[in-house]
Image: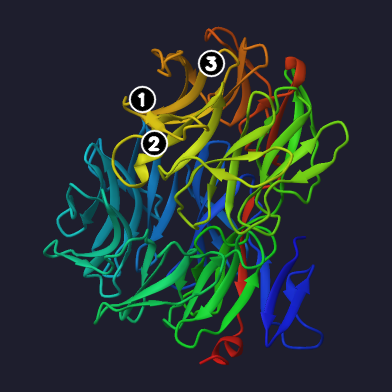
Amino acid sequence: MPLFTAVRSGCLLCAGSLLVACGGAEPDVRLRQLTTLAGDEVTPIFSPDGHHLAFSNENGGRQSVWIADLATGGLTEVVSEGLDPSWSPDGDQLAYQASPVAGVRSIRAVELASGGSRNLSPVGLDAFRPLWAPSADLIAFTVEGPSGRQVWLWSFEDGAARPLTSPPAGHIAYGWSPDGQSVLTISFAPEAQDVVAWRVDSGTPRRFTDSVGEEWWPTWSPRGDRVAFYTTYDDLMTDIWMSDVATGELSRITDFEGEDFLPSWSPDGEWLAFSSDRISKSGLWIQHADNGTTRALATEGRAGNRLPTWSPDGRTLAFSYLTAHTRLYRISRHGGEARPITPDDRNVVEATVSADGRRVAYESDNAGSEADLFVLELESGETLRLTDETAYNARPSWSPDGSTLALERSSGGGPRTTDVSIIPADGGESVRITHTGYVRSPVWCGGEIVFTVANAFTASEPDQIWIVSPETREARQLTVSPGNKRTTDCSPDGRVVYHVTVDRERRLRTARLSADGDLSEPLDLGPGEGGRWSPDGMEIAFLSSRDGQPDLYIVSADGGAVTRVTETPVRESWPDWLEGSSELVFSANMGGRDIWLAGLPASWLEGSR
């Protein structure tokens, strides 16, 4: 049973059971695990009457929508291929995002009494994240198209869909105003990202922010007077901010040296639930919107890295909780038993092996900070912590001589800007060598580093591959072709492996880096991601869901023979090779993410009014 903590009147409360109390005091937070399905349960949302909870289950590549009866604990699958449910105001229907068909998602609605469903989005348009309007006659959703992301509306009155926003900026729908007259969005322009509300009757935009920063996850107060969101302003860490609807005045609600994100209003508009790394990687907290009283609800493990949801009476919060750590494992390339090589209290995100096969560098996100890098000596089992700070340090890559690691690094929070940094593998200060922003997956290739620039965060352009010299620190773009690309490894003779997303499918490709620093025409190796070269450069280990669930595979460098290595119902990370090409190392969570409920006594909330 995981350990939860809560805070009341300065008293730290700990429990190994579902009832959290302090001595003989009144229980402050009653925690109850609601789901135990295989896979991950996410996106919980209460029914309008508060008696049921709809949520998504993601298991082995399959997505489904379920309903939990909160009185009996019974679980019912209502959609076999879909996710992200949204209740109709009368509670009789659920809108949801249907699983892709030929790479295209759609929005559908299911009648819970009959089980019948119908399509609500235009055929052929890739649509996601439905949001039912309070007035029940409209559903907002986002469409991914050639001109970027745009918000559309489905009208039950005329049975048709129409666009609400238009290019050149991209827009993503996040919620409705309480009166159902406006859709709240994040709008993306080449030089800006802001919170904007759009009138559904006229399509007129109302801008709530116009600042240098990245606003995310806006949510309208139930009273209609304020809009909360999280952002990074003035190079500070992520905090919760508000915009006054009447005046447009911005105010900072949280002021923590780490990260506060994903705000969610209580039904009375007095409290905000949010995620924070104040104690753990992502804990669940609440704060009074006016007087600033702050209380922790669940701060052990990863309890709050998905948006929490309030019950209609404001007495309960539902949230996703990761019930097991992700450990580092090793397995023979021929399959067999996977053996752990890191402690079960260390949450390993991604790992890579040094060229001599003696050390493993990995990222961990439960060591008291955002994300830090560690180096494990395989022979002795000793671990060196390379970073120890409230910064984001991720996705390490070994230099050919094993002396240095390249990494993604950022001191910002939430949806962050990152750049390539390098750090001595035996410890020392990190040095930033790019100023590109939105860097992903730096990979050492000879004496240079190739990496991905994630253009999709700021524009509709695809993510492309770049290269930088650690000595000159001059970066330049290598690719301009369609499809989002992610660099993952480079062979000793300069062959880059990466995956590219084409029609919502990730495919492995390799291309040779020439002496002039250019990439050759790519070789397509089929469906997969996270490819890593064997030490002899003859094979590539990778992750793929080609057989319906994510498992590890090996493919020959020419794209010929493919071998499946694992067959487990858990999500593994990108693999890497140990010395001699005989074993693979990877991280995996042998548990899953479940839905939990935090029951909040009314007296506990009313005491801060």
Q: Tell me which numbered mark, 2 or 3, is placed earlier along the sequence.
A: 2
The residue at the far right in this view is 380
Residue 537 visible here: yes
Whole-percent x, y for residue 155 in the image = 20, 57
Q: Nearer the viewer, mark 2 or mark 3?
A: 3
Reading the image, the residue beneath label 1 is: 479
Q: Mark 2: which secondary structure?
A: strand
Say above or below: 251 vs 59.
below
Viewer-side label of 2, 1: 1
Q: Is residue 31 left or right of residue 273?
A: right
Identify the residue at image location x=78%, y=51%: 345
Residue 308 position within the rendered picture, expressed as x and y whole percent measured from the top left: 52, 65
* Kind of residue at disc 2: Pro
Residue tagged 2: 100
Q: Is residue 547 visible?
A: no
Q: Based on the displayed image, in which of its 4 quarters is residue 553 positioned? A: top right
**Which kind of residue does numbered mark 3 sit on?**
Gly
The structure residue drawn at horizontal position 43% and vertical position 19%, both measured from the top left corner, is: 517
Q: Which residue is mark 3?
A: 494
Q: Is residue 428 above or below residue 229?
A: above
Give the CA distance from mark 2 to mark 1.
28 Å
In 3D space, how far apart are the residues under numbered discs 2 and 3 (Cα atoms)? 36 Å
Image spot of residue 556 (x, y percent): 59, 10
- Distance from disc 3 to disc 1, alpha carbons, whole Å, reads 16 Å
Residue 279 is situated, as x and y percent measured from the top left of the image, at 66, 67
Between residues 62 and 260, which one lies in front from this camera angle? 260
- N-term-proximal mark, 3 vs 1: 1
State which quarter of the image contains the N terminus.
Answer: bottom right
SS for callout 3 = loop
Q: Which numbered disc flags the more N-terminal residue, 2 or 1? A: 2
